[in-house]
Amino acid sequence: MKFHIVSDSSCDLGRERLERLGVSMVSFYAAFDDEVYFREERDIPTHRFYEMMAQRPGMFPKTSMPTMDDYLEAFRPLAAQGVPILCICLNAQFSGSWQSASSAAEELREEFPGASIQVLDSTLATVLQGMYVEQAAALRDAGCTLEEAVESLAPLPATGRIFFTTGDLDYLRHGGRIGRAAAATGTLLKVKPLIGYKNAGLISDGIAQGRKKSLAKVRELFFRHIQREGIDLNHYRIATGFGLDREEHAAFAESVYDGLLELGFDRPEVKCPYQIGVTIGVHTGPTPIGVGLIQKAG
């Protein structure tokens, strides 16, 4: 390998999957109230954290970004061996993870003159960041240099899009995404939010009445986007993601891929589903579910 990849845990690939890819993970931290902070995917599996959320309604966990020391621990052995490093971080508008990694890289360049460390603000999150990391690994495995990989990855974030919903408005209210009155009204009317991710930020894609209709609407918005933009799925990666309920997700994912076939598309190559991680889950609650796509590297 001509370079090594490091990603923060917000890419939602999970520890085992990242290990198989040959990617080092730096964990975010999460905690309930004043309890000890858990390192995501190290001290506690994501599924267990969602179970704890479901068992503690009305309690809102919090997260903390990786520290500079966390990144130094990941970078230093590689820098000492002269291995070039590509670090991919969560959208810097959402977290200071990129800043922590950048500070660590700056310190190591002084400690090891000539160290090659590229820290990228992916401007992405969750499944989009995960697919971005996977493509970085594919470029590495194809023999690209660090500089060649960075150049190939550069245009991809602008093509990323996510469509998702969640079943609990209280988490969005607690995180400041919607107001208290809107959350109360939505709960009373059993309205579910439709949320999108594009151009490095979250957007509202509307609302739907009830869980089944919100999932159907997510599919509809996804299909409409593909058709409106004239997207050739042969040049894109698709991923579905979920929080706690694997069975609900399996049915949703099947409906997405069946819908693509009905629209005349080939069934896309689908890898393992993504379990949306704690970093995003603290803002959505345990019931996020959705679909995302991003262009493949040239």
Image (cartoon, rainbow, N blue to C red):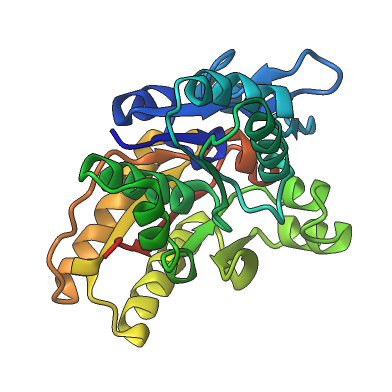
**What is the x, y in percent for residue 19?**
36, 23
Whether residue 111 sits left or right of residue 265 in the image: it is: right
Can I make out residue 48 in this image? yes
Vertical placement of 9 versus 197: above or below?
Answer: above
Can I make out residue 56 in this image? no
Q: In which quarter of the image is the N terminus?
A: top left
Whether residue 108 sits left or right of residue 273 in the image: it is: right
In the depicted view, which residue is nearer to us: 198 or 187? 198
Whether residue 219 sits left or right of residue 144 in the image: it is: right
In the depicted view, which residue is nearer to us: 102 or 258? 102
Vertical placement of 55 versus 151: above or below?
Answer: above
Residue at point 64% right, 64% down?
A: 202
Residue at point 51% right, 47% down?
A: 126
Q: Quadrant of the C terminus?
A: bottom left
Whether residue 239 sits left or right of residue 258 in the image: it is: right
Vertical placement of 278 versus 131: above or below?
Answer: above
**What is the x, y in percent for residue 160?**
45, 65
Q: In which quarter of the image is residue 21?
A: top left
Residue at point 43% right, 70% down?
A: 159
Q: Tell how many labels.
A: 0
Q: Quadrant of residue 194?
A: bottom right
In the depicted view, which residue is nearer to us: 84 or 206? 84
**What is the x, y in percent for residue 258?**
20, 61
